[in-house]
Image (cartoon, helix red, strand yellow):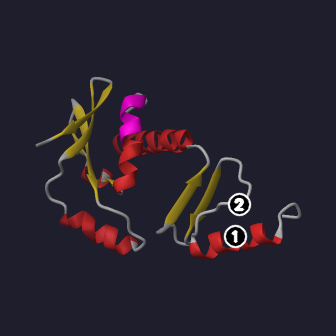
Amino acid sequence: MDALSNIQIAELLFFSHLARPLHNVPKERFAYFAHDDGWFNKLYVTDLHDYEMLLSKVIILKLQKLTGRKLENIPKEISSVLLESTRDGLFIDLSKTIKNSIELKIPIAAIGHFTDMDKVYDFREEISDYKVWLVYSKKLWKLIKEV
């Protein structure tokens, strides 16, 4: 903190209290903000590749915990589509994963951007017809878009 200017300290305070983006504060790779209950989170990265890798790894780790299966890494061509989808408010609903002995189907939707996580939680119940699925079958990942 001693190396930061007053403006940089003020920006850190804005970030911590209001979840405003960081512009002038030196950060190595990540800046993470979470409400004390973890319900609201913001992550700022200096390199989008880091966020792409993080997103892919979290999906795999959560699915492994949910299913008990060992899963292969999500390939770059799919992780880059997922990253691009975050611009539209990517919603990955692991609670509605369809599991059988052959494949895993994870529903994906674009829902926009929200700061009220209760609205996102309620919105989850409103989605009844997913058009995009992240599918893992025979040790391969694919994105399927239904018409």
Mark 1 falls on what kind of element? helix
Residue 46 locus on image (x, y percent):
62, 48
Residue 92 locus on image (x, y percent):
33, 51
Q: Does the magenta stretch include residue 80?
A: yes
Image quarter of the N terminus: bottom right
Residue 129 relative to residue 121: left or right: left
Q: Residue shown at 63%/51% (left/top)?
A: 30
Q: Mark 2 points at which residue?
A: 24
Depth order, front residue of 46/35:
46
Residue 142 locus on image (x, y percent):
28, 31
Residue 138 relative to residue 14: left or right: left
Q: Is residue 144 magenta?
A: no
Q: Are marks 1 and 2 in contact (CB under 8 Å)?
A: yes
State whether residue 15 appears in this view.
yes
Residue range corresponding to the magenta coloring: 74-81
Mark 2 falls on what kind of element? loop
Magenta part, dominant SS: helix
Depth order, front residue of 10/69:
10
User: Are there few (<14), some (14-19), or many (20+) residues within 10 Å of tag 1?
Assistant: some
Q: Is residue 15 above or below residue 141?
A: below
All told, the count of numbered labels is 2
State whether residue 75 appears in this view.
no
The amino acid beneath tag 1 is: Glu
The amino acid beneath tag 2 is: Asn
Q: Residue shown at 40%/32% (left/top)?
A: 74
Q: How far apart are marks 1 and 2 (CA)?
A: 8 Å
Q: Is residue 67 above or below residue 72?
A: below
Residue 11 locus on image (x, y percent):
70, 70
Residue at the limit of the structure toward the right, as seen here: 2
Q: Name the residue under label 1.
A: 11
